Image (cartoon, grey):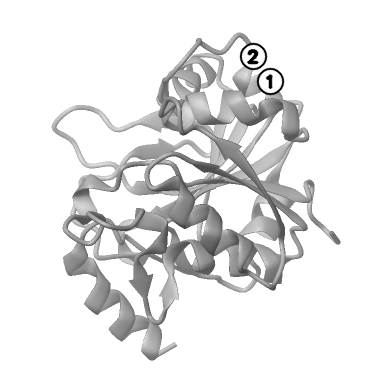
Amino acid sequence: MSGLVSDTAMVLSAGLGKRMRPLTTSRPKPLVQVAGKALIDHSLDQLASAGIAKALVNVHYLADALEAHLANRTAGPEITVSDERALLLETGGGMAKALPSLPDPFFCLNSDNIWLDGPRDVFAELSSAWDPQRMDALLLVVPHSRAQNYRGSGDFHLDPAGRITRRRSSRIAPFIFTGIQLVSRRLLRDAPEGPFSTNVLWQRAIEEERLYGISHNGLWFEVGEPGAIAPTEARLSHG
């Protein structure tokens, strides 16, 4: 785990994947194929290559299929499952449920992430910038120029110190959240019961000036809809 502040990542994989229909009618979104590989395998393979030993994967929609796929993986990281079959807990609720099995800090990423690293892998970049005295979470964000297939208005601003503020209504923000973050257990203190979004926790951290971000130096791919798959595969084929 050289240079990394954590050996564990949570991979958020429980969502319904509605935007990816009809491909998700019969399979969970993490098992949609892009460039010959399931989306979740892109993320897990990146974790393994970065030296992250453990991954905690939450499951809900078509959970049996996802669990079977994970059981058949032969490469690292070591995978454990957080079962949300009974109730989909959203991003924040999923993290709160899994918290007893997570170290401090831990990486967290969406299972539909595809990215190309810059000079260093993103987990080493996050680790180098991590300061638990100042931060409850450190988000990997990407400028519009490095965000492939993205058509939105952005999510966040960064001040010179890296503190995050949100995009204002009817404005454009320069940075997009990649779905990858480094999280302190402090972020999840006094978490609500049941389903809730990580945005609830981020908002408190913003108000306390403890939500930070760093800019990704490689490429990041938005793969939220079926139409994004072909351009992503074309770009990946060129390295």
The structure residue drawn at horizontal position 30% and vertical position 75%, both measured from the top left corner, is: 232
The structure residue drawn at horizontal position 59% and vertical position 63%, both measured from the top left corner, is: 44
What's the amino acid at mark 1?
Arg
Percent x, y of residue 52: 74, 58
What's the amino acid at mark 2?
Arg
- Crowding near the residue tagged with mark 1, few <14, some 14–19, many ≥20 C-alpha atoms within 10 Å: some
Vertical comparison of 35 with 93: above or below: below
In the rendered structure, find residue 206 and report the number of the disc placed on it.
Answer: none
Q: What element carries label 2?
A: loop
Check contact, mark 2 vs mark 1: CB within 8 A.
Answer: yes
Percent x, y of residue 98: 63, 30
Residue for badge 2: 189
- Left or right: residue 157 compared with residue 58: left
Q: Does residue 112 show up? A: yes
Q: Quadrant of residue 166?
A: top left
- Left or right: residue 91 compared with residue 225: right
Q: What element carries label 1?
A: helix
Q: State which quarter of the image contains the N terminus.
A: bottom right
